[in-house]
Amino acid sequence: QTDEFRGIMGKLAMPWFTVAGNHDIYWRGPNRPDEEHEGNYERRFGPLWYAFEHKDCWFIVLYTDEADPLTGVRDFNKPASQKMSPEQFEWLQQTLPRTADASHVFVFMHHPRWMGGKYGDDWERVHALLAAQGNVSAVFAGHIHQMKYSGVRDGIEYFTLATVGGSQAGDIP
């Protein structure tokens, strides 16, 4: 599947960037390795979280399928599995100052953690870090198969995007 995906995407006339999600990482079946498919993903696509600059803007990709640090469980329905690891948070703290001169910073991730509930209660510290930077314009996520605008908070707009190949209800206009 990875070869097929890369073959299709490789025909594009522009660069493309991936955001890892649960369908890319979660192991199905017996003999689940501790890191599930993280290593496979990184070998085929690169880092699980990363940032790059393009035309006076920065793009930050966060990884939202890290395991519960106590149990190792990955489950997007369990708040304990919806926390950013100390390693990724530290990386974000070190990366944001590099974006200081950018006109805009855009953040991308799979799970819309700002929604709370089953998406956990860990987003507040991440949002505070983004807001303090002063030039983060928007955060984008997917996963819920619905286009949703969650509004502006501290100058940052929050969006969830519809599907990119998955199913969605037929009653959506």
Image (spheres, helix red, strand yellow):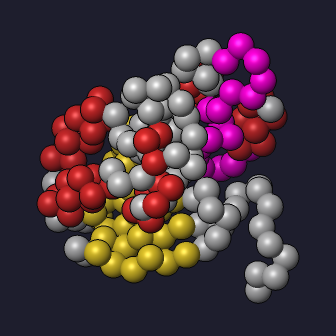
Q: Is residue 57 visible?
A: no
Does the magenta run of residues contain 58? no
In the picture, residue 150 is in which quadrant? bottom left
In the picture, residue 158 is in which quadrant? bottom left
Which residue lies at the image location 49% right of the left edge and 78% below the top edge?
149
Q: Position of residue 5 (x, y in %)?
A: 76, 38
The range drawn in magenta is: 11-32
Residue nearest the observer in this picture, 127 or 49: 127
Does the magenta run of residues contain 13? yes
Q: Position of residue 165 (x, y in %)?
A: 77, 55
Check the picture and name the quadrant holding the C terminus: bottom right
Q: Position of residue 78 (x, y in %)?
A: 52, 46
Residue nearest the observer in this picture, 121 or 127: 121
Which residue lies at the image location 15% right of the left edge and 47% below the top edge?
97
From the viewer's perspective, tell me whether residue 26 is left or right of residue 120. right
Q: How many labels were placed on the picture?
A: 0
From the viewer's perspective, tell me whether residue 62 is left or right of residue 77. left
* Vertical placement of residue 108 versus 33, above or below: below
